[in-house]
Image (spheres, rainbow, N blue to C red):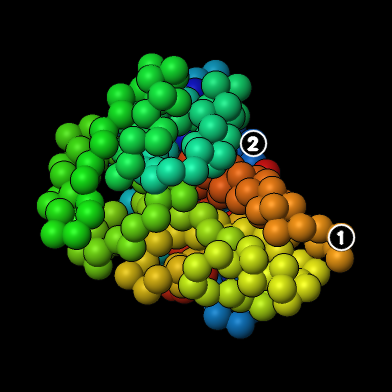
């Protein structure tokens, strides 16, 4: 949605008449409802919705529209969030050594598939500096080895605050985030990691997968919580593996899955197509 308008995300207990009440509110304020996606969770008894509303052509007072919605929102006992359109989400990308996910993000941002403004690329190694410099994006190398780990995360925290970052992407950032960092930016950190069936932990998981003759490998894009790799899942990508694939082939296929899953996850997030519901994410795909 490129024209001026609003995105509204809403969640509440499921009840009769929600759709009619919201649609009536939009119409009464002369908004043009161009998309209304909804999900009623029969097991959990909850209602989730995402709306796109055009405002410019109909002389809608956008601030009055947002302020006035509070009465309806409170009557539904809902949680809701408005985003004005168009926009570009300020994003920081954290990296270590591998660059395939970083390059995917930069490429899609350049194509304008992702409405993001990358404020900086932050790395605990120097490996991706040349990529950042080529893209004219500030690169910050932060030492996080040994006793420098806590200070390193404090520096990252300060950079994120100073740059008004709305989204943090861990593009194969090989550090475990402290609990306090996860809490401070809850719902705003996206991670990507490999997904094997079955799972392999420890060093060199692709070699382990090869030795076990796995038939499927993939990647999971998820929100970060204090519980390692257990946050709400946004997107997953899976590919078939055959007996003739070598360990290096598995790495190649795995990287492809990581790039696609991460790109989709970022896209869903920045287009406000996700609503976190406890341990899971409700995703309205485009």
Q: Is residue 43 above or below residue 18?
A: below
Residue occupying the point 61% across, 82% down = 43
Residue 185, visible in the rendered structure: yes
Query: How dense is the environment of label 2, judged by Cα within 10 Å: few (below 14), some, or many (20 and up)?
Result: few
Q: Is residue 211 left or right of residue 145?
A: right
Q: At which x and y percent is residue 278? A: 44, 73
Q: At which x and y percent is residue 228? A: 40, 71
Q: At which x and y percent is residue 21? A: 53, 55
Q: Tell me the quadrant of the picture where the C terminus can be found.
A: top right
- Residue 206 tag number: none
Give the SS element for disc 2.
strand
- Name the residue tied to disc 1: 244
Residue occupying the point 41% across, 24% down = 130
> Of the residues under marks 1 and 2, which one precedes in the sequence?
2
Q: Tell me the quadrant of the picture where the N terminus can be found.
A: top right
Q: Is residue 286 left or right of residue 68?
A: right
Residue 31, visible in the rendered structure: no
Pair 1/2: label in front: 1
Q: Residue furthest bottom?
A: 43
Marks 1/2: CA distance? 49 Å
Give the SS element for disc 1.
loop
- Name the residue tied to disc 2: 34
Q: At which x and y percent is residue 224? A: 40, 61
């Amino acid at each position: 949605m490129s024209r001026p308008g609003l995105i509204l995300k809403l969640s509440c207990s499921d009840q009769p008449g929600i759709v009619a009440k919201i649609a009536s509110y939009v119409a009464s304020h002369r908004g043009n409802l161009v998309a209304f996606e909804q999900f009623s969770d029969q097991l959990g008894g909850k209602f989730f919705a995402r709306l796109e509303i055009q405002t410019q052509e109909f002389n809608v007072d956008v601030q009055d529209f947002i302020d006035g919605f509070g009465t309806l929102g409170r009557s539904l006992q809902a949680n809701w969030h408005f985003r004005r359109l168009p926009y570009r989400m300020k994003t920081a990308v954290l990296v270590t050594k591998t660059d395939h996910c970083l390059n995917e993000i930069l490429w899609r941002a350049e194509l304008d598939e992702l409405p993001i403004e990358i404020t900086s690329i932050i790395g605990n190694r120097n490996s991706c500096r040349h990529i950042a410099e080529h893209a004219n994006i500030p690169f910050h190398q932060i030492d996080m080895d040994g006793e420098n780990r806590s200070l390193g995360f404090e520096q990252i925290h300060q950079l994120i605050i100073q740059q008004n970052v709305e989204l943090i992407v861990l593009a194969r950032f090989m550090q475990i985030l402290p609990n306090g960092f996860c809490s401070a930016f809850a719902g705003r950190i996206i991670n990507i990691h490999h997904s094997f069936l079955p799972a392999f932990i420890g060093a060199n998981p692709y070699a382990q997968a090869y030795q076990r003759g796995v038939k499927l490998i993939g990647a999971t894009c998820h929100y970060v919580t204090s519980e390692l790799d257990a946050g709400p899942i946004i997107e997953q990508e899976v590919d078939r593996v055959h007996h003739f694939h070598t360990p290096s082939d598995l790495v190649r296929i795995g990287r492809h899955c990581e790039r696609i899953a991460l790109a989709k996850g970022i896209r869903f997030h920045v287009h406000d197509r996700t609503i976190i519901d406890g341990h899971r994410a409700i995703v309205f795909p485009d």
